[in-house]
Amino acid sequence: MTIQVLGSGCPTCKKLFELTKQAVKELTLKETKVEYLTDIQKIVEMGMMSSPVLVIDGKPVLAGFLPDKEKIKEIIKKSA
Amino acid sequence: MDIFYPIKIFADWLTYDVLGLAPKKILAEAVNFFLYDTIKIFLLLSVIIFVVSVIRSFLPPEKIRRFLSRKNIYLGNLLAALLGIITPFCTCSAIPLFLGFIEAGVPMGITFSFLTASPMINEVALVLLLGMFGWEIALLYIASGLTIAILSGIFIGKLKAEKLVEKFVFNGKIKNFQSDIEMKWKDRIAYARKYTADIIKKVWLYILLGIGLGAWIHGYVPADFLAQYTSADKWYAVPLAVLIGIPLYSNAAGVIPLVGVLAEKGIAMGTTLAFMMAVTGLSLPEFLILKKVMKTKLILIFASVVGAGIIFTGCLFNLILK
């Protein structure tokens, strides 16, 4: 599974990246990559317009706000 | 009936019974004013931001774009400005929002109506206006903000300013238009709670400082003291207020309660409203970030058109609201 955090480089985006990394670690998922991308064009291409965006295997699953870690875990488990 | 009356009783009880301050003294009045305003503003902030966030969870920008790309001008400008009210504006999202609109074929003018209304009419400013001046002034603020956003957008749309936007903006291809992320009621409530807490965490200190300074002025500065310096009949009062407002965006939450008290000390209402609109609607960080996607000339046009609209509105209200 590939998890990407797309953002404009703002503090909220970085925090989402940190939380996602922690969530993946706590779920002890194997072969899961977490990336942080700041390519805004990519956000737009996906059809999203707010940042940050959480993307799992190419599919946007959350956009525009920072959830708590439990919520991120829940989303990852659902997409797995 | 004043719906804030119970808060008044509570503030009175705190001031005169719990703190034991003697009524009618300046210190007691200032403390009472501070407690009353603080409780009222924070209650309003929590309730209104929460409600607005729930509504917003039904209207993510992706959905708004679908509405706007199908609308003709004028009606589109009106809708864009209305939708701008409930959308929070964050410099984080300014670029993806702009690109997303333009690349999806939303006309420039409509995009600018949205870009004007979104920061100018925001829920924090509305709550503070509601709390300090009452609902009539809050409504007046919404109405004038909408008018400025609609007219600025129509004007910029007429300019055919597409060549002032960086070229790559038009090259992009959006692959996915149906990208709504499913949300259940539980998610909406959680989102609204989190958003409200985040906003309050971000602004509480500024608001306390603003109200504190305001309470001091309320108690110790004589009424009408400022009127002699900034009376409505001085032609430069409104433009000056707008200029001072531009760099203050990040501190809007603290500036507004302070302005409320200044209005009480004699600054004309039109000048006050113009100042508030400049603080929220003309933001320096927003302009700087928009430079990534448009030429400086377009940003200057945008700022001048909105600025002129604000100055006009301010002067108009100074004439009418005497």
Image: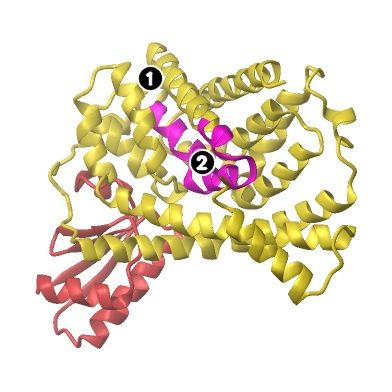
Chain colours: A red, B yellow
Q: Point out the stretch of residues depicted in magenta.
A: B112-139
Same chain for the residues at labels 1 and 2, yes or no? yes
**Relative to B41, is B229 above or below?**
above
**Relative to A40, is B182 above or below?**
below
Residue B169 position, x and y percent, is: 31, 33
Q: Which quadrant is the C terminus of chain B positioned in?
A: top right
Q: Secondary structure at mark 1?
A: helix
Dividing the picture into quarters, in which one does residue B268 lie? top right
Mark pair 1, 2: CA separation: 20 Å
Q: Residue B12 versus residue B170: which sits nearer the camera? A: B12
Q: Residue B155 versus residue A46: which sits nearer the camera? A: B155
Q: Residue furthest left?
A: A80
Front: mark 1 or 2: 2
- Residue type at tag 2: Glu
Circle 2 is placed at which residue position? Answer: B286
Residue B166 can be seen, yes or no: no
Q: Main secondary structure of the magenta part?
A: helix
Residue B163 tag number:
1
Q: Residue furthest top?
A: B158
Residue B131 sits inside the magenta stretch: yes
Residue B17 can be seen, yes or no: yes
Dividing the picture into quarters, in which one does residue A41 lie? top left
Q: Residues within 10 Å of mark 1 (few under 14, many from 20)?
A: few
Residue B141 position, x and y percent, is: 54, 31
Residue drawn where x is 78% and y is 63% of the image? B31
Dividing the picture into quarters, in which one does residue A38 lie? bottom left
- Residue type at tag 1: Lys
Image mark count: 2
Residue drawn where x is 33% and y is 73% of the image? A68
The answer to whether residue B217 is left or right of residue B59 is right
Residue B317 position, x and y percent, is: 65, 21
